[in-house]
Image (cartoon, rainbow, N blue to C red):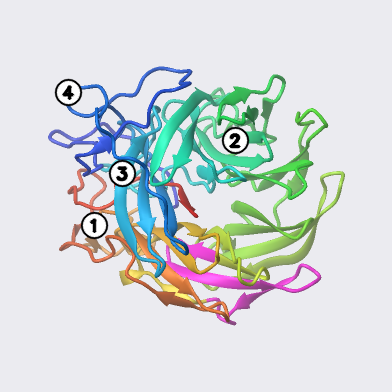
Amino acid sequence: MGNVIPQESAPQGANPDTSQDPTVTPAGNAGTTAGTTAGPQGGTPPGGGTDPTPTPPSTPTPGSGFVYVMSNQETGNSVTVFNRSVYGDLTRGGTFVTGGLGVGKSYDLEAASDPMVSQGSLIASPDQRFLLAVDAGSNEVSSLAIEGDQLRLVTRVPSGGVRPVSLTVHGDLVYVVNAGGLPPNTPPNPDAVIAGFTLGEDGTLTPLEGSVKPLLGGPAAGPSQIAFTPDGTQLIVTERQTNIIDVFLIDGCGLPGDPVRNESNGPAPFTASFQGEDVLLVTEIIGVNFTYGSLSTYRLSPDGKLTVISGSVNTTERTACWTADSVLDPSITYIANNQSGTVSGCRFAEDGSITMFPEDGHLVTARDQHATQDMAITNDGRFLYVLTAGYDEKIVDPRLPTYVEGSPYSNRMSISAYRIEANGSLTALTGYAVADEPPTVASVGLLELQTGIAPGSEGLVAI
């Protein structure tokens, strides 16, 4: 998180492909509508073609499931499948290409963690038969069929704009928000826009004519999430850089009207999630004294106007970003605080107001306060998974005032895992790749490549 530095070419000797996975599996090309798959972590196996004897999909045992992580690599986007045991343990499975390109870079500190600055870059369809992924580097959206522990590419279509960062789905209607470019994306650069698609029974995405609409903030909007209301009649988009929350009313044909403007109660609105039918929770990256993250809740009216219920509640943690709603206790939402490397909780009252849970908002800390990012909760509500960077961002990033020279750094990412207890508390589990190799010293230039999850990965789904 934080400010964006200019993107640089890979320093001499750097290898921008950091998948560290020698067995990337093509996800198939049935129904592909744009281009072909190419490149490491996004192409065919050595020698070309497909494996003539593919491993048949496996069926999870009762109580087990899968976790999916999107690589978001500029050399080729892909999704890795992790098999989840009944105890929450993760075993890495196959990696399947989306056919498009990501924007993650191992050799650039900004793009080695959260390069899209968004939530919802990888989502599941309501019936969990398909994964939908943004290909931010090639301006596309891909759909992949879930077939046990394997994925199959169904279709890939243009995103309707530049640099897609977040997706949402309601029934057979899918919308994406395109950021337009890297912030500050000032005119005459492309506008940030939304675009719609229909999702076919077979997972095919079809662009919805007349669905492309610009955000109120134009090129400089910096959108972080697009989200349907629970009834599918409105779309919410948070504009992180302009402090605007756009609301689009959706007509009977699935098309949006002009956006309704709402000012965010706090600066840098990030995620948008619903409690019940009309209570909207928005995280604010720097909501309190431009230091601590905060949360605001709003009542959404049918005309698209928002009324504040709880305004900028202090999380006491730095950069409140991603959220995940509890299944076991629907009154609880978990929040990932990126620079603090922690997970907080908030509890909803019946009127939509919130209080931090526990009182100081501090539930768990990632190993060595490594930066916490995307979160996902399993269908049965028992496990929370958190995509985690290989460093404590607030002391490693030299662009931040909290920077400490010589701080240890590893650009390998991991998955932190927690068991969700009956009272909402979290108990740490083993996770995946959490125990780091000996760290290096941070630098904005060439970063030492290490094993684990590719730096720049973004997007997490658990089922």
Q: Nearer the viewer, residue 21 or 1?
A: 21
Residue beneath label 1, please?
410
Q: Nearer the viewer, residue 62 or 140?
A: 62
Residue beneath label 2, please?
177
Category of crowding for the residue at label 3, using alpha-carbon neighbours closer than 10 angstroms: few (below 14), some (14–19), many (at least 20): some
The location of residue 157, given as percent across then percent down, is: 52, 23
The location of residue 212, given as percent across then percent down, is: 67, 25
Q: CA distance from mark 3 to mark 4?
A: 18 Å
**Residues under numbered marks 2 and 3 in contact, where contact means CB atoms less than 8 Å apart:** no
Instruction: Give the residue at x 46% y 21%.
Output: 32
Q: Amino acid at mark 4?
A: Gly
Q: Secondary structure at mark 3?
A: strand
Instruction: Please say if 439 is above or below 450.
Output: below
Does residue 291 appear in the picture of this structure? no
Q: Amino acid at mark 1?
A: Ser
Category of crowding for the residue at label 2, using alpha-carbon neighbours closer than 10 angstroms: few (below 14), some (14–19), many (at least 20): many
Q: Nearer the viewer, residue 105 or 388?
A: 388
What's the magenta region?
335-361
Q: CA distance from mark 4 to mark 1?
A: 32 Å
Q: Is residue 298 left or right of residue 62?
A: right
Q: Considering only order in the chain, which callout, 1 or 2, is on the residue closer to the N terminus?
A: 2
Q: CA distance from mark 2 to mark 1?
A: 31 Å
Q: Residue 47's mark?
A: 4
Q: Considering only order in the chain, which callout, 1 or 4, is on the residue closer to the N terminus?
A: 4
Q: Is residue 267 left or right of residue 308?
A: left
Q: Amino acid at mark 2?
A: Val
Magenta-colored stretch includes residue 351: yes
Q: CA distance from mark 1 to mark 3?
A: 24 Å
Q: Amino acid at mark 3?
A: Gly
Q: Residue 94's mark?
A: 3
Q: Considering only order in the chain, which callout, 3 or 1, is on the residue closer to the N terminus?
A: 3
